[in-house]
Image (cartoon, grey):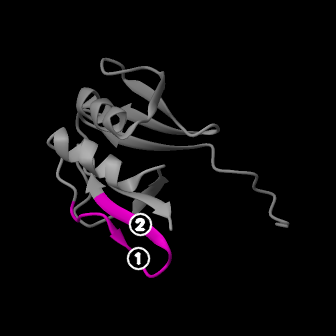
Amino acid sequence: MSTSPIESLSAVTLMTDNMKASVAFYDTLGFELAFGGADASFTSMRIGSSAFLNLQLDEGWMPPAVKWGRFIVWVDDVDAAYDRLVDAAYKPTLAPSDAVWGERYFHVTDPAGHEVSIARRL
């Protein structure tokens, strides 16, 4: 049992210069729109039952020149998520593979330049 005073991660907020493209990308992955949308300046998308991905419009946003890191989303079927993205013309940086640490995963970059890892425990 953890003794940390932190209960859970509520949300991550990412900047985007194109809300419509970002919402379409996360919709393709299966995120559920909770607030805002393609024409909003702020959008919140549900991740599972208790977390959110927030997207904030900044028309001057540019991804950092160096990688900032990535966030990881667990899905029910990694290969199906990969196929949905490829079918929608997104370009994951690698095909789904089994990692030595016990996950099946792949990486993809969203339209705003944020790297996302799509994964599932083996």
Report the residue at 48% width, 60% height from top: 120
Judged from the image, the secondary structure of the residue bearing numbered disc 2 is strand
30 relative to 58 in the view: left or right: right
Q: Is residue 92 above or below residue 103?
A: above
Q: Nearer the viewer, residue 100 or 71?
A: 100
Image spot of residue 11 (x, y percent): 56, 42
Q: Which mark is residue 27?
A: none
As for residue 78 lying within the magenta part, the answer is: no
According to the picture, the residue beneath numbered tag 2 turns out to be 104
| Location of residue 69 by image quarter | bottom left
Report the residue at 38% width, 64% height from top: 105
90 relative to 119 in the view: left or right: left
Image spot of residue 7 (x, y percent): 76, 52
Q: Amino acid at mark 1?
A: Ala
Q: CA distance from mark 2 to mark 1?
A: 6 Å
Label 2 close to label 1 by CB (< 8 Å): yes
According to the picture, the residue beneath numbered tag 1 turns out to be 99
Mark 2 surroundings within 10 Å by alpha-carbon count, few (fewer than 14), some (14 through 19), many (20 or more) = some
Image spot of residue 31 (x, y percent): 44, 35
**What residue range appears in magenta?**
93-107
